[in-house]
């Protein structure tokens, strides 16, 4: 039995993309064991081609695993009823170019068997939510800018008020403001108790929002854990403070605790995720070249 | 068939006529259709077993499928689907204007409807067939299936959605095309009415002013009042040719009519080999029954080698008073199989056919059915010279049931009028059997009469100057002694109306017999040469039914296209759909190949020794397998020849609603296994 608190669990999940010759086969994912608890923001990191998208497609049942299995909300991946509770933002915004934003969302809402009133409400609500300029909503998506298309794709993923939201490179194609909005949105989703799985190779996206993350490299998990633990430097102590006078500054280095400083923060020094990631990839690469 | 003959034959025997037989080859290869049925049944079973969960969800799934369908329509609309009916209309209107000039009013409807409806079917089949083949592959290429596939939708719903969407597009376009057709025909009709009014007024004026002898044409008046857009309802009878029939043979056989286009075919599957280089043989003809029996009769015989129709021999034979003739073909070796004793080589020319025609008018010849009965009524047999061919002495009979083909064009048959030279020979009779008239609505005139409409053409062998006269004898099978007999002038190729008392209508069949009264005048008749008119129905309803038949065909090709594109890219899918359509149209052709035995020739070889050589065996085996595969394939394809939206409307006849319903049921029956294939192919497919 799978505890209901687990949104996703995979066991030895592997995917080899078929090729006519053995040399053409791509082992995109090897023995992936993943656990995502409900209510978590989960980051799926890895350089290009490390198997993030493959993992996500397997979780949605869009492709079939070569071996192993995956449970999503306690059901086998791809179960039709479970997909009612999932929202998916694809890596690129694969939408019908000949529909406008409203028609697009209306179509997807129909796939969730929403009635007319529900559809109208959901469509307007989520287009506002993702901040799509109202003046473009009646235009064909084929004419949209990349960022505008991305917003429609995002609205499409949230349309059914899903419990589990899977986002593949959510910030790609967005401007810095858009990125910030996405981050805020993810925080709001966390507050609403949703589970979010997001993949990215842009570490700044993930750094502030993720509870847990894995780093994939060539289809295998290289690093896994809570973000806080991963980024802590265990052997370094850090202190920062405000309103520090000249004298105190001098004294602080000797007796920090005795000083009259306010808002003293202490803690382990943190690496930047980007450094951690770079170091990991560099280590793997050098290991391979040896 | 023959039971029917036995039933009707004696009834008419008293009147000196009997019904003729029309040859229908027995259908063969039942096992192939059974095999096809089993395959289709297994397909549906596999579908139900694998898809039962998806099928169970269809209650709510249909609205999801329809969502997919709507997007598919949007896609088509965006690809300028709306232009298709407009282009169609432009082409048809132009073609119509160019072609229709100079037709009589009823011909105008025929031509317009042929152009408009054929073009509709053709354009929509092509357009929607192509759309069906590209819509899924295009979604795959554009990756829109990735997003759609992440939603709670099953593969079955996806498949159904595509079919539903394109079918709805077809409905939309057909509706527009129907309205355009209707509007156009309305305008045409107005013009025809106006022209008829003018013409009638002119005729009436010149008749009133005694410039014209004939009274104004009532037909023109009718058109000026009612127009030509009609959907007539009428009852047709089943035509039997009532010539002279020989009941001595079993089954009874129709006599060969002298001077007509009738040909009697005898087929010998293969004339068996003899051991001598030059076999001696002759064809012995024996006429069972000849009218008049006094005269020495000539027959033309032709021997044809089936594998090589250019290899023929002809001769004219004169029957002796006993009705016999013997023919020794000059160079028999090219028709007869034999063994060359020197080389041991076997020569086999394959099946041969003997065609018999009789050139003389007024002569009727009965050849029996080709079997050699124990009596002396043999019709045709090959007799071998017993002294030279000891192992094959005696007679060889052809295949039973020789075929008489006397059909002129359009399936019309001729009936011969009275003979000039032999008054004792009665003219032939065409007999129509109207069944179940008591269940039909038949308008009765004020005098208690109902109207029979007769359209026949007349072939004048002599007495060209005389107007053709027909004698009609009508009675009800319940009261065969109460007969109405009348003679009437025949309007050639036009409607001749005949009034009959309504007392003839009853629970039994109405029999109407027709014969020519003028010596040398032959009538050409077919099933609907004699009809009973009923109140007309509306033209637009008739048009609608024709469109429904087109729709059925379109939905079927859409299903085939979508199904084909689940597994392969669009070019191969289009090819598959096209092949399915072509094979589906060949259904009857391939069936006829098997039934007429035409495929025996595939396996035919002149030198029988060849048959034992290994490569011949392999080749023969492969041909055999391929021919049978073709046969099975054709049986697995839906029969597209079934859809005939034109048949009724171009005859201004109302299409019976049953035909539409049956076509729909049949289409569903074809769609189901097709969808099953599509589902099985799509079920485990990766959408990304
Ligand atoms: N359809 C496919 N066929 C063959 N190889 C594929 C296919 N899709 C992805 N791959 C390969 O699988 C590996 C993982 O791809 P992907 O999961 O898309 O990586 P990413 O982590 O960038 O999302 C890559 O090497 C990619 O080239
Ligand atoms: Mg990716």
Image (cartoon, rainbow, N blue to C red):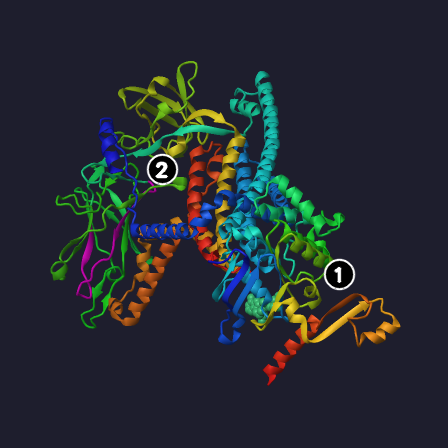
Q: Is mark 1 within 8 Å of ligand 2?
A: no
What are the residue bounds of the magenta stretch? B260-284
- Residue B119 in view in this figure: no
Q: Nearer the viewer, mark 2 or mark 1?
A: 1
Q: Is residue A124 left or right of residue B112?
A: right
Per the image, is B380 magenta? no
B359 or B679: nearer the viewer: B679
**Residue for badge 2:** B413
Residue B280 painted magenta = yes
Residue lying at 28% horizontally and 71% vertically, measured from the top left: B614
x, y percent for residue A50: 60, 71
The quadrant of the picture occupied by the C terminus of chain B is: bottom right
Label 2: element kind: strand
Q: Indicate the position of residue B383 as horizontal and vertical percent values.
A: 17, 54
Residues packed near mark 1 inside 10 Å, few (<14), some (14 to 19) or many (20 plus): few
Image region (quadrant) for ligand 2: bottom right
Query: Where residue A175 is drawn, which disc sits there?
Result: 1
What is the distance, in whole Å, between disc 2 and disc 1 at their CAs?
A: 84 Å
């Amino acid at each position: 039995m799978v505890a209901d608190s687990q949104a996703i669990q995979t066991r030895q999940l592997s995917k080899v993309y078929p090729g006519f010759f053995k040399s053409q086969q791509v082992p995109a994912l090897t023995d992936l064991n993943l656990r995502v608890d409900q209510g978590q923001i989960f980051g799926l990191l890895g350089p290009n081609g490390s198997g993030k998208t493959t993992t996500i497609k397997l979780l949605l049942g869009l492709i079939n695993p070569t071996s192993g299995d995956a449970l999503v909300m306690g059901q086998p991946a791809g179960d039709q009823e479970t997909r009612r509770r999932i929202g998916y933002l694809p890596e690129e915004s694969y939408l019908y170019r000949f529909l406008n934003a409203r028609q697009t969302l209306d179509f997807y809402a129909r796939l969730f068997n929403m009635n007319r009133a529900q559809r109208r409400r959901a469509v307007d609500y989520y287009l506002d939510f993702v901040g799509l300029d109202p003046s473009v909503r009646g235009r064909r998506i084929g004419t949209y800018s990349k960022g505008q298309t991305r917003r429609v794709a995002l609205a499409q993923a949230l349309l059914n008020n899903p419990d589990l939201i899977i986002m593949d490179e959510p910030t790609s194609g967005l401007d810095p403001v858009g990125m910030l909005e996405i981050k805020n949105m993810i925080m709001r989703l966390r507050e609403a108790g949703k589970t979010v799985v997001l993949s990215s190779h842009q570490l700044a996206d993930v750094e502030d929002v993720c509870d847990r993350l894995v780093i994939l490299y060539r289809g295998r998990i290289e690093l896994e854990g809570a973000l806080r633990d991963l980024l802590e430097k265990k052997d370094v102590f850090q202190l920062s403070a405000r309103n520090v006078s000249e004298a105190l500054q001098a004294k602080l280095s000797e007796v920090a605790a005795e000083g009259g400083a306010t808002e003293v923060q202490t803690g382990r020094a943190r690496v930047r995720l980007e450094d951690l990631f770079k170091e990991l990839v560099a280590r793997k690469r050098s290991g391979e070249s040896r | 068939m023959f039971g029917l003959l036995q039933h009707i034959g004696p009834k008419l025997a008293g009147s000196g006529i009997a019904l003729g037989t029309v040859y229908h080859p027995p259908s063969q290869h039942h096992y192939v259709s059974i095999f096809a049925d089993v395959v289709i049944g297994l397909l549906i079973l596999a579908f139900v077993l694998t898809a039962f969960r998806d099928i169970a969800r269809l209650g709510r799934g249909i609205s999801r499928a329809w969502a997919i369908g709507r997007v598919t329509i949007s896609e088509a609309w965006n690809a300028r689907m709306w232009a298709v009916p407009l282009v169609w209309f432009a082409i048809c209107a132009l073609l119509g204007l160019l072609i229709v000039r100079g037709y009589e009013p009823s011909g105008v409807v025929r031509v317009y409807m042929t152009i408009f409806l054929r073009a509709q079917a053709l354009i929509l089949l092509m357009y929607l067939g192509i759309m069906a083949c590209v819509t899924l592959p295009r979604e795959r290429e554009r990756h829109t299936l990735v997003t759609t596939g992440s939603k709670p939708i099953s593969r079955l719903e996806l498949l159904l959605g595509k079919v539903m969407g394109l079918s709805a597009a077809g409905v939309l376009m057909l509706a527009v095309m129907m309205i355009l057709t209707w509007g156009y025909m309305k305008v045409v009709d107005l013009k025809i009415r106006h022209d008829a009014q003018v013409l009638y007024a002119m005729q009436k004026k010149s008749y009133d002013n005694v410039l014209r002898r004939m009274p104004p044409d009532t037909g023109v008046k009718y058109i000026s009042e009612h127009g030509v857009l009609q959907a007539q309802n009428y009852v047709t009878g089943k035509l039997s040719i009532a010539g002279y029939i020989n009941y001595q043979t079993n089954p009874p056989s129709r006599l060969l009519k002298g001077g007509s286009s009738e040909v009697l075919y005898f087929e010998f599957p293969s004339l068996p080999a003899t051991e001598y280089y030059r076999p001696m043989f002759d064809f012995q003809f024996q006429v069972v029954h000849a009218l008049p029996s006094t005269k020495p009769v000539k027959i033309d015989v032709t021997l044809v080698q089936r594998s090589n129709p250019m290899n023929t021999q002809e001769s004219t034979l004169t029957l002796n008073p006993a009705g016999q003739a013997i023919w020794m073909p000059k160079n028999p070796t090219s028709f007869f199989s034999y063994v060359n004793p020197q080389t041991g080589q076997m020569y086999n020319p394959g099946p041969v056919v003997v065609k018999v025609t009789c050139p003389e008018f007024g002569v009727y010849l009965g050849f029996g059915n080709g079997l050699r009965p124990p009596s002396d009524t043999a019709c045709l047999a090959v007799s071998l010279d017993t002294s030279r061919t000891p192992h094959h002495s005696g007679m060889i009979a052809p295949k039973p049931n020789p075929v008489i083909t006397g059909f002129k064009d359009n399936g019309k048959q001729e009936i011969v009028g009275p003979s000039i030279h032999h008054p004792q020979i009665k003219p032939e009779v065409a007999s129509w059997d109207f069944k179940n008239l008591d269940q039909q609505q038949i308008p009765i005139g004020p005098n208690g009469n109902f109207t029979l409409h007769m359209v026949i053409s007349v072939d004048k062998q002599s007495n060209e100057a005389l107007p053709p006269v027909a004698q009609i004898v009508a009675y009800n099978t319940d009261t065969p002694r109460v007969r109405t007999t009348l003679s009437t002038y025949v309007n050639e190729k036009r409607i001749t109306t005949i009034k009959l008392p309504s007392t003839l209508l009853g629970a039994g069949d109405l029999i109407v017999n027709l014969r020519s009264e003028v010596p040398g005048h032959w009538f050409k008749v077919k099933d609907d040469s004699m009809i009973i008119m009923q109140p007309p129905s509306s033209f637009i309803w008739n048009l609608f039914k024709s469109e429904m038949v087109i729709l059925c065909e379109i939905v079927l090709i859409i299903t085939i296209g979508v199904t084909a594109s689940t597994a392969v890219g669009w070019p191969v899918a289009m090819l598959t759909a096209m092949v399915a359509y072509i094979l589906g149209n060949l259904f009857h052709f391939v069936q006829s190949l098997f039934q007429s035995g035409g495929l025996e020739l595939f396996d035919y070889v002149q030198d029988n020794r060849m048959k034992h050589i290994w490569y011949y065996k392999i080749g023969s085996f492969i041909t055999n397998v391929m021919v049978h595969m073709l046969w099975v394939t054709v049986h697995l394809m839906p029969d597209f020849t079934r859809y005939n939206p034109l048949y009724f409307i171009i005859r201004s006849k109302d299409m019976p609603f049953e035909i539409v319903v049956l076509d729909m049921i049949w289409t569903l029956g074809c769609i189901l296994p097709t969808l099953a294939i599509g589902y099985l192919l799509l079920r485990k497919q990766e959408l990304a």
